[in-house]
Amino acid sequence: MNIQVFQGGFDKNLSYVIWCKKTRIAAIIDASVEINPIIEFINNENLILSKILITHTHHDHIYYLKDFIELYPTINIYCYKNAINMDVDFTSLTDNEMITIGNETIIAFYTPGHYSDSMCFWNQ
């Protein structure tokens, strides 16, 4: 699994592009950074963006979500099943659920604390 970090947003938030080396299939973790540098990176690396994973639904972590959906209308959004601030369609996640990104597997862990719909994502 490859990872590229992007910093920005309202409180020096982070967004991540993660991708499978073999398939070039990619996902974004959190839509909290202005999208142009992320889209430029995805295009320059010839990645295929297929998913956005949301760690929690504080406003600043989903601020650019609709911008990504506008550019990629078939993109799949993943977040905790009882997401609080989501007004877009998404795939509900539960604790210990697996998500594939190309040949890579991500495990979603429900981690309430910072926010009641917080999730962590782990690549085995």
Image (cartoon, rainbow, N blue to C red):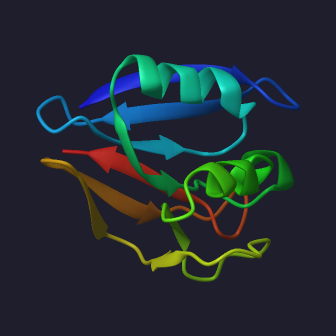
User: What residue is shown at x 30% (from left), y 35% (from top)?
Assistant: 19
The furthest residue to the right: 10
Q: Nearer the viewer, residue 84 or 64?
A: 64
Residue 80 located left or right of residue 121:
right
Residue 95: quadrant of the picture: bottom left
User: What residue is shown at x 80% (from left), y 56% (from top)?
Assistant: 58
* Residue 10 visible in this rendered orientation of the protein: yes
User: What residue is shown at x 33% (from left), y 26% (from top)?
Assistant: 46
In the figure, 94 relative to 113: above or below? Answer: below
* Residue 114 visible in this rendered orientation of the protein: no
Q: Position of residue 124 (x, y in %)?
A: 18, 45
* Picture quarter with the N terminus: top left
Residue 115 located left or right of residue 78:
right
Residue 81: quadrant of the picture: bottom right
In the figure, 116 relative to 48: above or below? Answer: below
Q: Nearer the viewer, residue 113 or 3?
A: 3
User: What residue is shown at x 74% (from left), y 57% (from top)?
Assistant: 66
In the figure, 60 relative to 16: above or below? Answer: below
Q: Position of residue 49 (x, y in %)?
A: 41, 45
Residue 40: quadrant of the picture: top right
Q: Position of residue 121 (x, y in %)?
A: 40, 50
Residue 31 located left or right of residue 100:
right
In the figure, 100 relative to 7: above or below? Answer: below
